[in-house]
Image (cartoon, grey):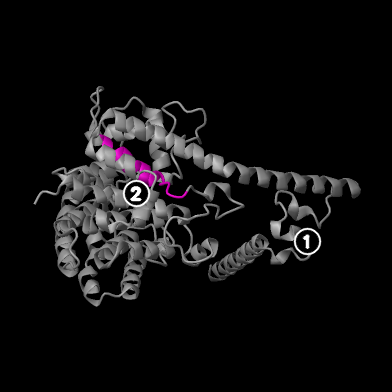
């Protein structure tokens, strides 16, 4: 059965929702998520300021990360191109344009691209250096094995293309070239294709789908190894300790047991055995073996998208990548009706995404580029007052430092040496009786949380020093 546009559209909308919902919590530990959110988050935050002392970590509610930008730019493979460039080069060109073009003023300036990881940073720098491109210059041969790029597997399925495996490989190679992320993107595409025929069904044969997915992934891995073994060898890469199918193999039996705790412990144990250097401690780790397997597990075991969104948010770790893959696959499974209205309308890019999928013309791509620049500018404007407040605190600290030095005859007093570049915490500015004010209570709570986190970090460091 060929899926209609109405059936395919929720894949990409769901992925954008998952990325945008998870963006504010990206990289946080599980316990830290509820601490900074002051409770268990369930969707888009009403107050975007989670980190009053770290401006760049605060994001506009509903705004997607660079992963969502990459997904939207990947739609350019069906865009008309007067320059005759390869379809994947068109994707690179859009991302390069968003970053500020081929000749940026500052090598650290990435324009309208937001929160770039190392692989995408390296790719953009390479595209800048090699522009205009030769046939293979837009491919990045980095050795990362992150879960985020696996979400591009949703693109060829959402566009209704035939050879999804070939498109997954080409789109993933923009930033990732190892076996696991290549196979991961293909696995996402195959899982989406297996779910689409059952879209809207209240029950699915999870174990049966997991078994079929495993067989398809094994065939794809064989194809990948045959195609790229010599290139991997030229790059000096050793053969991976395990393949993606190794991680997917227990999914069928786990779906029979239907236990999140059992699935999490099984996935983490497998990841620790295959990649001990990564210190995988939870299933939403950025490593493909853990994060992608967990995302597929959640998509096949979920009973509703709202509950799964909540679980992914509160799981911490790679909330963007795991969220995008999980919600994209749930879009394939539940359809538009399964995506809560407050999530689809709260996602800033949902409408322009729908328009491009329905009609990928130049007008809609131009709208996307303009919107991306505007959203990034709005986010920076939101951060400006936070930066000004911190700068004012630094100036006060510097003035106090200078005054103390002048009083001590130019010698730095030991009591003030630690405050050179560190502004006094806001909770120390409180006057007697202000602790009962709700806003002041929040400051005190954040201060206690930071002290607790610092204490745990110090304890872990001492433990590592002892074991080393």
Given residues 122 and 319, the one toward you in this image is 319
- Taking the spot 34% from the left edge, 62% from the top edge, the residue there is 306
Q: Is residue 348 left or right of residue 333?
A: right
Q: How many marks?
A: 2
In the picture as drawn, the residue positioned furthest to the top comes out as 82
SS for callout 2: helix
Judge the density around disc 2: few (<14), some (14-19), many (≥20) Cα neighbours within 10 Å: many
Looking at the picture, does residue 121 appear above or below residue 436? above
Is any part of residue 140 visible from this angle?
Answer: no
In the picture as drawn, the residue positioned furthest to the bottom comes out as 257
Range drawn in magenta: 61-76
Magenta residue check for 188: no
Position in image of residue 383 (x %, y %): 57, 44
Given residues 57 and 345, the one toward you in this image is 345
Q: Where is mark 1, residue-wise?
A: 431
Position in image of residue 273 (x %, y %): 34, 68
Looking at the picture, does residue 348 appear above or below residue 271? above
SS for callout 1: loop
Q: Where is mark 2, residue-wise?
A: 16
Looking at the picture, does residue 396 appear above or below residue 242? above
């Amino acid at each position: 059965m060929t899926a209609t546009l109405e059936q395919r559209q929720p894949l990409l909308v769901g992925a954008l929702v998952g990325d945008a919902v998870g963006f504010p919590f990206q990289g946080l530990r599980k316990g830290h998520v509820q601490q900074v959110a002051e409770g268990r988050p369930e969707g888009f935050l009403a107050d975007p300021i989670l980190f009053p002392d770290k401006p760049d970590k605060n994001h506009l509610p509903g705004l997607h990360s660079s992963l969502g930008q990459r997904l939207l730019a990947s739609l350019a493979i069906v865009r008309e191109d007067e320059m005759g460039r390869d379809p994947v080069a068109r994707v690179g060109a859009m991302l390069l344009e968003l970053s500020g073009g081929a000749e940026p003023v500052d090598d650290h300036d990435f324009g309208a691209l937001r929160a770039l990881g190392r692989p995408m940073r390296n790719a953009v720098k390479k595209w800048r250096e090699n522009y205009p491109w030769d046939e293979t210059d837009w491919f990045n041969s980095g050795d990362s094995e992150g879960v985020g790029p696996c979400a591009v597997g949703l693109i060829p399925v959402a566009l209704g293309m035939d050879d999804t495996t070939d498109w997954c490989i080409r789109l993933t190679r923009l930033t990732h070239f190892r076996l696991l992320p290549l196979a991961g993107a293909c696995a996402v595409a195959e899982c989406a294709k297996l779910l689409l025929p059952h879209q809207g069904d209240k029950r699915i044969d999870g174990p049966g789908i997991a078994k079929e997915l495993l067989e398809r992934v094994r065939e794809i891995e064989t194809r990948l190894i045959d195609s790229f073994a010599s290139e991997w060898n030229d790059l000096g890469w050793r053969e991976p300790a395990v393949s993606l199918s190794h991680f997917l193999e227990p999914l069928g039996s786990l779906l029979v047991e239907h236990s999140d705790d059992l699935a999490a412990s099984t996935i983490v144990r497998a990841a620790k055995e295959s990649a001990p250097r990564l210190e995988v401690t939870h299933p939403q780790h950025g490593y493909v073996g853990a994060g992608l397997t967990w995302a597929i597990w959640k998509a096949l075991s979920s009973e509703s998208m709202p509950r799964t969104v909540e679980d992914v948010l509160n799981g911490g770790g790679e909330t963007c990548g795991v969220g995008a893959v999980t919600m994209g696959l749930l879009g394939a499974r539940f359809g538009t009706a399964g995506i809560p209205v407050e999530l689809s309308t709260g996602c800033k890019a949902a409408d322009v995404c729908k328009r491009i999928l329905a009609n990928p013309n130049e007008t809609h791509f131009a709208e996307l580029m303009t919107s991306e620049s505007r959203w990034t500018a709005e986010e920076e404007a939101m951060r400006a007052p936070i930066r000004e407040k911190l700068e004012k605190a630094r100036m006060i600290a510097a003035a106090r430092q200078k005054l103390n030095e002048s009083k001590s005859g130019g010698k730095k007093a030991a009591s003030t040496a630690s405050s050179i570049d560190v502004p006094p915490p806001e909770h120390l500015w409180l006057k007697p009786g202000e602790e009962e004010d709700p806003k002041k209570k929040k400051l005190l709570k954040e201060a206690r949380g930071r002290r607790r986190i610092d204490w745990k970090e110090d304890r872990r460091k001492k433990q590592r020093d002892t074991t080393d």
